[in-house]
Image (cartoon, rainbow, N blue to C red):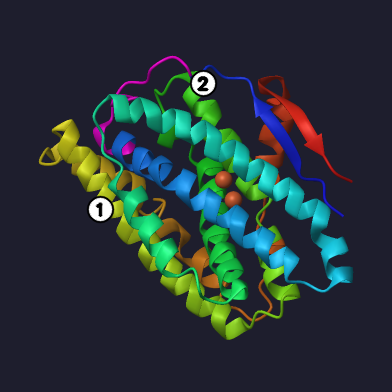
């Protein structure tokens, strides 16, 4: 059923990173740092939600998805662990992860809502990460000048996000999740995610002393808002999720698969379920 491989990535995360690790560019570093700060708490939520969603399925459906969910959880657990190490370096540099505290509170506040909606919120976030992943493979310049080990970290994560992009979506559908709620959750998750990442990026830039530099905002425009930027260039893909017959597999992942094939010396598979 599933070909999700859990990989141990062979990079040195013990060596410290610089505040402007992303090519010396203050905005690109601050933005990616904000994303990384969102991952450990977010990925724990995805794992918990999809595992709970699987448990709530009838036995025959559970058998159908068990291996895939195991692969999904294994991949997200590895991401969470590596990004916690990355974030540890940021903490040493004095960056404060307010996003994590806020997200944790929100998750605790929503704990009583239907399991299906937790899976739907996860599927929506996975749509965002799959779009981000595909964009990264088309725009490697987003990491220009970063150390190779950090480029590997981000591309490996992007590749696995592309790889497991339909797991939460399929569990949501198997759990009887509706199209109406799927769309509603995408809008909610998108708003919350971008509000969180924007606030944390500003916080990171303030700590870096780059918040009021012209070059910071020129870089922000280039990365996010230019015609091929991460936000503006991806609106149609984001919107595609609202189609009743949308499925994550409709989105191309050929570059992600090629990256995994061409960089197989950078990781060792630790688990595969067939
Ligand atoms: Fe992840
Ligand atoms: Fe993911």
Residue 19 is situated, as x and y percent measured from the top left of the image, at 28, 26
Vertical arrangement, residue 216 with respect to residue 13, above or below? below
Mark 1 C-beta closer than 8 Å to ligand 1: no
The first of marks 1 and 2 along the sequence is: 2
Q: Which type of secondary structure does the marked residue at label 1 adopt?
A: helix
User: Could you tell me how far apart the alpha carbons at marks 1 and 2 are, in whole angstroms?
Assistant: 27 Å
Where residue 268 sits, quadrant-wise, is top right
Q: Residues within 10 Å of mark 2 (few under 14, many from 20)?
A: some
Asked whether 86 or 131 is in front, the reply is 86
Residue 47 is situated, as x and y percent measured from the top left of the image, at 61, 53
- 23 within the magenta span: yes
Q: Which residue is mark 1?
A: 199
Chief SS of the magenta region: loop
On the rendered structure, is 181 left or right of 105?
Answer: right
The residue at the point 17 percent across, 35 percent down is: 207
Mark 2 C-beta closer than 8 Å to ligand 1: no
Total marks in image: 2
Asked whether 117 or 250 is in front, the reply is 117
The residue at the point 15 percent across, 39 percent down is: 206
Tell me where the magenta segment starts and ends, as one range.
14-28
| Image quadrant where one finds the N terminus | bottom right
Q: Say which of marks 1 and 2 sits in front.
A: 1
Asked whether 88 or 233 is in front, the reply is 88
Residue 128 is situated, as x and y percent measured from the top left of the image, at 51, 58
The residue at the point 57 percent across, 74 percent down is: 117
Q: Which residue is mark 2?
A: 149
On the rendered structure, is 69 left or right of 121?
Answer: right
Q: Is residue 170 visible?
A: no
């Amino acid at each position: 059923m599933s070909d999700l491989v859990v990989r141990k990535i062979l990079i040195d995360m013990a060596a410290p990173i610089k505040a402007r690790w992303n090519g010396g560019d203050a905005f690109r570093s601050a933005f990616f740092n904000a994303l990384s700060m969102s991952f450990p708490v977010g990925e724990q939520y995805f794992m918990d939600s999809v595992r709970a969603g699987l448990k709530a399925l009838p036995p025959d459906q559970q058998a159908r998805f068990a291996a895939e969910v195991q692969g999904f959880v294994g991949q997200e657990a590895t991401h969470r662990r590596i990004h916690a190490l990355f974030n540890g370096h940021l903490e040493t540099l004095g960056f404060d992860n307010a996003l994590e505290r806020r997200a944790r509170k929100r998750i605790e506040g929503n704990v009583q809502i239907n399991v299906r909606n937790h899976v739907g919120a996860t599927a929506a976030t996975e749509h965002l990460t799959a779009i981000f992943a595909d964009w990264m493979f088309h725009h490697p310049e987003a990491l220009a000048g970063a150390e190779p080990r950090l480029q590997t970290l981000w591309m490996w994560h992007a590749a696995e996000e592309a790889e497991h992009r339909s797991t939460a979506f399929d569990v949501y559908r198997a759990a009887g999740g509706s199209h109406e709620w799927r769309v509603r959750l995408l809008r909610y998750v998108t708003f919350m995610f971008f509000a969180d990442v924007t606030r944390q990026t500003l916080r990171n830039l303030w700590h870096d002393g780059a918040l009021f530099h012209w070059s910071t905002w020129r870089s922000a425009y280039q990365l996010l808002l230019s015609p091929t930027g991460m936000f503006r260039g991806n609106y149609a893909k984001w919107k595609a999720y609202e189609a009743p017959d949308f499925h994550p597999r409709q989105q191309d992942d050929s570059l992600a698969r090629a990256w995994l094939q061409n960089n197989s010396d950078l990781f060792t598979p630790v688990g595969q379920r067939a």
